[in-house]
Amino acid sequence: MVRYAFPGSDVDGHFAGFDRAIGVLAHTRGGHRARAATLGAALASVLALWLLRRRDPSGEWTGQRLATFYDHVCDVLDGHGDDFVVYLGELDLGVESETSIGWYNACFARSVVQVLRRDAGLPQAALLASDWEEATDEEMRDAATRVPPLPAEVIPRGMPEEHWWWFIASGPPEEIAYY
């Protein structure tokens, strides 16, 4: 799913959106991929709040409330490890698809993982492989030359260059309608 004008500025909505999606996760049918998609909807809140904090680092919500939220996210992921593993697998499928939509989804998930590891304190063990980040980055660098560049309007607002995967795709342009 491509998200335009992401992230929205409703901080409280992003905090609540995580719990709302996690509440749905317990009742999600359709197998592991459906559960991973629901988990991904929840994890979008993690990336949204990170980007909003970058925009306004002095916001009243950026202190203890955000730290408590990150602890909550890590606890949820600890209890939904199988779903998180499938979520990570979906990132790989997105890269391997060598399509704009697949690349967008892979970039989104890779940014979520970066925030989880560096800001939320997600343990390396949650990624199942000690070199997951390095191996994924290598795979993304390799595939980037075959993937069409993402249009600027679909890259989340305020995405820093340290999340290079959003900006590296350099394959032939693709004519695609983003809905």
Image (cartoon, rainbow, N blue to C red):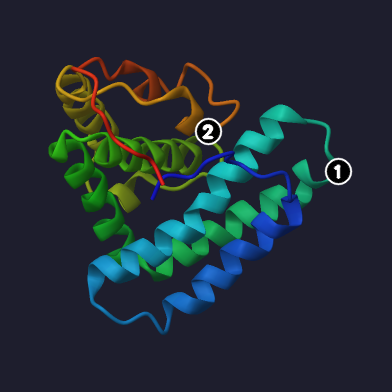
Left or right of 41: which side holds 165? left
Q: Which residue is mark 1?
A: 60
Going by the image, does 131 lie left or right of 9?
Answer: left
Q: Work out whether residue 170 or residue 125 is closer to the camera in this orientation and state it.
A: 170
Query: Against 23, is 36 above or below?
Result: above
Question: Depth-wise, is mark 1 or mark 2 nearer the camera?
Answer: 2
Residue at the location (21% across, 21% down)?
144
Q: Quadrant of residue 28?
A: bottom left
Distance from disc 1 to disc 2, alpha carbons, whole Å, reads 23 Å
| Closer to the camera in the image, 115 or 8 | 8
- The residue that appears at 30% across and 48% down in the rendered structure is 127
Find numbered disc 2 in the image and state the secondary structure of the residue it sits on: loop
Mark 2, residues whose alpha carbon is within 10 Å: few (<14), some, or many (≥20)? many
Amino acid type at mark 1 = Glu
Q: Position of residue 64 (x, y in %)?
A: 77, 49
Q: Position of residue 74 (x, y in %)?
A: 50, 57
Residue 158 in sight from this viewpoint: yes
Q: Which residue is mark 2?
A: 156
